[in-house]
Image: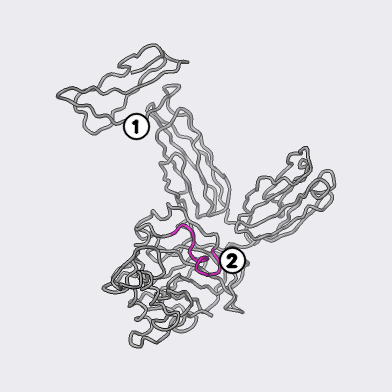
Amino acid sequence: DLYDGTAWVTDIAPPISGDQGDQWIQETVDLSNWIGQTVVIRFRGITGGDFTSDMALDQIAILDVAAPPVVSFVADPPAGCLGDVVTLVDLSQNLPTAWSWDIQPATGVNYVNGTSSSSATPQVVFTQAGTYSVALTASNMFGGSTVTQPSAVQQVDGVGLAMAVTTDRYGSETTWTVTGGTSTYASGGPYATVSASGAYPQDTVLFCVPGGTCMDLTVYDSFGDGMCCAYGAGGYQLLTLTGDTLVNGDGQFTTVRTDNFCAPYNLRLQLRAWLEGAHLAGSTLMRDDLRASGLIPLVSPYPALGFIGAEDATISPSVLATTGPDAIVDWVLIELRDPASPSTIVRTAGALLQRDGDVVATDGISPVTILGDAASYLVAIRHRNHLGAMLLNAVPLGGATAVLDLTDGSVPMWGSGALNDLNGTWALASGNVVVDGTMKYTGIDNDRDPILQAIGGAVPTNTVTGYSNADLNMDGIVQYAGVGNDRDIILDNIGGSLPTAVRPEQLP
């Protein structure tokens, strides 16, 4: 029914009666008689003494014309670095109700953050460099059409940078470029001139450059008095997306200032590792009970536990929605160390361990990528309640992706007995509850007592659930006694017969 401001017009759509089952019924109503008016539409169910009416409503759309969509879309951003999230934004007219995206080539295309090829605004991460064609088919009850953009997305195997500019009063005098050889990678300005002297931050510009490339940042002032300090404290910073400063300009120059800088490399690691605590006997997959129970935090736990690095590592909730072999087991910490001083940690990355042993970046898909200088590094992997381990031999990074499998017993490891052999799969040893690099069953700072304390300290048969270092078998339950308890893991890993034995972590 429709109310036009004076009276109700009933049955503007044909009445439906009888048992309609569970299928959806689609109706189209011509509202052209009420163009320009404000109306009220109601859905009316009639009941009686011997019958009922039950309605469910969905996908109500008011269209200005009975026509299929006029399809249009943009990619945001259209160009960027591998691993960046690209959002495909539908701009179609005439209210589409269904979408189908086709990206070619399809290799290296991953829909993320809970989106898919049928989402109105999907988000995509690309893992292969190149130019991608994107086609969108959008439809509604009147039909559909397709638009293809042959070069909708360009992805570069490079490094993301950020240019932050603060102008003085006369922002219209300021421009800048980032160039290398004959290529201009980014530019900005002129900015606005304002009425008063001061410091005026501008929008940060994000862009991508080839890793390991040296180039010039050139800042211009058309008047010739720089950006500081007579009319405000202007200046600029060129940063990596992890916060490392490449250029710090104080704005004190005349007409032009050029700073040469070298972008870091993407140091890529394709790692495999295994956690003894998450091991399932007889299975080729680790347990993902922490993920299934919703216990894995969205922020890396390692800074709060005293580990160095991974301060800004976070994940999207959709990363934890993946099931099967690629489901997330837990956070891990990757360290790159100096071969000349193995105890010196040069770079770190928060990463995720999948059930099949793959260690991936925080998008849940890509290889682990760390910004740094092209060089050889000792690679270590740490876990919050397992003993960490490190490869014996330095690994060259900065070129092709390094493929490292710590589950392979033939790979030389630092120290002696760094990993446990689980029927041919080598794994980090569980039992380091205190996170001090030493596994102890008795004595000061032992790893057994925190398990008892976690369940209350008085009744050893109690259990508690949660994301805890005391949960050594990673089932989401802290258990001190009984079948499947966490305490026995420590005793087994220090030898099983002498409770005063100590097992040190094999890291320098």
- Amino acid marked by disc 1: Asp
Left or right side of 164 for 426: left
Is residue 281 something one can see in this rendering? Answer: yes
Q: Which residue is mark 2?
A: 398
Q: Is residue 483 above or below residue 29?
A: below
Where is residue 233 shown, x and y percent of the image? 77, 50
Instruction: Residue at 50% x, 76% y: name it.
Output: 390
Q: Residues within 10 Å of mark 1 (few under 14, many from 20)?
A: few
Instruction: Residue at 42% x, 44% y: name it.
Output: 117
Where is residue 220 shown, x and y percent of the image? 79, 48
| Front residue of 487 and 98 | 487
Q: Quadrant of residue 356?
A: bottom left
Is residue 300 rendered magenta in the image?
A: yes
| Front residue of 485 and 99 | 485
Disc 1 or disc 2, which is closer to the eye? 1
Q: Is residue 10 above or below residue 354?
A: above
| Front residue of 80 and 307 | 307
* Range of magenta residues: 297-310
Where is residue 287 shown, x and y percent of the image? 34, 65
Q: CA distance from mark 1 to mark 2?
A: 53 Å
Is residue 4 rendered magenta in the image?
A: no
| Front residue of 312 and 258 | 312
Left or right side of 405 for 340: right
Q: Quadrant of residue 312?
A: bottom right
